[in-house]
Image (spheres, rainbow, N blue to C red):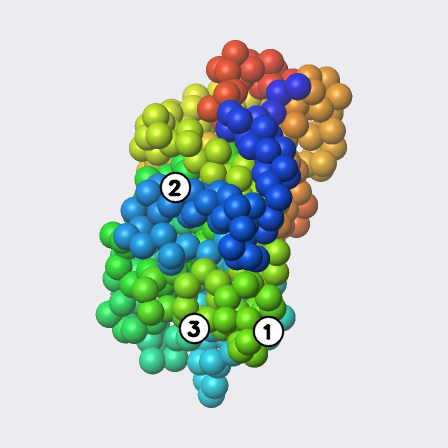
């Protein structure tokens, strides 16, 4: 098996994750439900996870981090809240490469007319010099991904955030493809109101946890409410803090697994991971670019990216190429639209049914590049 689908989910998970999850199933109690030893042990696991996330993100207060069941649910919550404030001729702005986790809730709640796109170059990167052309008084909020799940490009968060801050616009970043892989501090990004993450991608944890950092004072409406063990006599959840967004019995095995996965960062710097990932990408790109009949859409400039490479083989269906690579070499990679039709529309690969996505991880040896490229060359011809 050659696993080239790290942008979808981590494999293998960081060391010890499965064992930590099993141990959490043995905890006799639930977070915030009672003061007995089991409930306290569960609370300690949650506290450990939040504290490690705060360290990783450069967050001053770990109580600003909520553990949603997925980054999709965190984004839905934030987008529903922003669009709930829509009136008159106001719009939600987003990047042109956004994932369906952003585009779909925005269109469902606000309708296509409420959605506008940030001025972007051919690669989909926001052209910050053109932001001033937007009438900021009509912007409800900006939602932008940190790294693309289709091409690996990074967005200029600091510049976009500074513009948002200048105009009092809430700035929300989808960090699903970046958290744990791209160096970033929530405390250093101007204007940032929320940063959403996927615990099962580059954080190396299990599925089922989507941490979200929110700026002090930023208190969107929760999408769902219910029991959380806090102020139970009241008909509402707290005005602030993680309890606002964590109603319902938390996924303790998932949280314990993520906490364990985050121990990895005690002796692995995110900056080193990013440099290694970029260098790895360059090696793949060099090899892939030399194959006749294989194109890399949107591969322009030398700015660092994550190791996510889209491939287009003119005249070949991406699904068929992926199936052939699997049959011949056991390659596991994603084909199609990767839940990002907007990105493919922008890159011009929507009509072709998307791309084949090569997403190596740090465990992927350089020795697999040659066999994969040889197989691609045969398939392309
Ligand atoms: C850029 C981006 N945003 C959001 C998501 C949604 O993450 P999840 O499916 O873990 O909720 C993904 C998942 O692939 C993604 O790549």
Is residue 64 positioned above or below 320 on the image? Answer: below
Report the residue at 47% width, 86% height from top. Answer: 87
Q: Earlier in the sequence, mark 1 or mark 3?
A: 1
Report the residue at 60% width, 25% height from top. Answer: 3
Residue 8 locus on image (x, y percent): 58, 39
- Quarter where residue 104 is shown: bottom right
User: What residue is disc 2 on?
Assistant: 52
Do callouts 2 and 3 mark residues in contact (Cβ within 8 Å)? Answer: no
Q: Earlier in the sequence, mark 1 or mark 2?
A: 2
Quote the CA–CA distance across marks 1 and 2: 34 Å
Do callouts 1 and 2 mark residues in contact (Cβ within 8 Å)? Answer: no
Quarter holding the N terminus is top right
Is the residue marked by circle 2 packed among few (<14), some (14-19), or many (20+) residues within 10 Å? Answer: many
Residue 211 locus on image (x, y percent): 48, 51
Residue 203 locus on image (x, y percent): 47, 38
Q: Is residue 225 visible?
A: yes
Q: For numbered disc 3, what is the local secondary structure?
A: loop
Is residue 165 positioned above or below 283 on the image? Answer: below
For this view, does 297 lie left or right of residue 320?
Answer: left
Of the residues tagged 1 and 3, which is closer to the observer? Answer: 3
Q: For numbered disc 2, what is the local secondary structure?
A: helix
Of the residues tagged 1 and 2, which is closer to the observer? Answer: 2
137 vs 105, nearest the viewer: 105
Residue at the limit of the structure toward the front, as seen here: 36
Ligand 1 is within 8 Å of the C-beta of the residue at disc 1: no
Mark linked to residue 109 = 1
Is residue 154 positioned above or below 278 on the image? Answer: below
Quarter holding the C terminus is top right
User: What residue is disc 3 on?
Assistant: 239
């Amino acid at each position: 098996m050659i696993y080239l689908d790290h942008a979808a989910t981590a494999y293998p998970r960081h060391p010890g994750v499965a064992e930590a999850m099993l141990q959490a199933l043995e905890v006799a109690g639930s977070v915030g439900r009672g003061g007995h030893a089991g409930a306290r042990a569960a609370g300690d696991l949650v506290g450990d996870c939040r504290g490690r996330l705060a360290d990783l993100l450069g967050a001053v207060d770990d109580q600003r981090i909520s553990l949603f069941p997925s980054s999709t649910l965190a984004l839905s919550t934030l987008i529903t809240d922003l669009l709930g404030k829509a009136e008159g001729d106001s719009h939600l702005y987003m990047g042109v490469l956004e994932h369906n986790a952003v585009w779909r809730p925005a269109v469902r709640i606000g309708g296509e007319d409420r959605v506008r796109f940030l001025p972007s170059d051919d690669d989909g990167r926001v052209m910050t010099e053109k932001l001033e052309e937007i009438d900021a008084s009509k912007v409800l909020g900006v939602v932008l991904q940190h790294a693309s799940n289709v091409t690996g490009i990074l967005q200029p968060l600091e510049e976009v955030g500074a513009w948002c801050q200048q105009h009092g616009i809430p700035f929300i970043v989808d960090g699903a493809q970046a958290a744990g892989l791209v160096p970033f501090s929530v405390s250093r990004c101007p204007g940032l109101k929320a940063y959403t993450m996927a615990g099962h991608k580059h954080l190396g944890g299990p599925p089922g946890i989507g941490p979200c950092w929110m700026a002090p004072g930023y208190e969107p409406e929760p999408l769902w409410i219910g029991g959380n063990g806090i102020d139970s006599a009241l008909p509402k959840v707290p005005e602030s803090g993680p309890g606002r967004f964590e109603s319902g019995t938390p996924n303790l095995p998932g949280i314990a697994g993520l906490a364990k996965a985050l121990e990895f960062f005690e002796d692995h710097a995110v900056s080193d991971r990013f440099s290694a990932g970029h260098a790895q990408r360059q090696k793949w790109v060099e090899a892939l670019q030399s194959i006749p009949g294989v194109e890399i859409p949107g591969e322009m400039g030398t700015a660092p990216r994550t190791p996510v490479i889209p491939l287009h083989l003119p005249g070949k269906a991406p699904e068929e190429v992926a199936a052939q690579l699997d049959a011949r070499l056991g390659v596991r990679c994603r084909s199609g639209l990767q839940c990002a039709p907007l990105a493919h529309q922008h890159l011009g690969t929507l009509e072709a049914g998307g791309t084949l996505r090569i997403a190596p991880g740090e465990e992927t040896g350089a020795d697999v590049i040659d066999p994969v490229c040889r197989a691609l060359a045969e398939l392309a011809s």
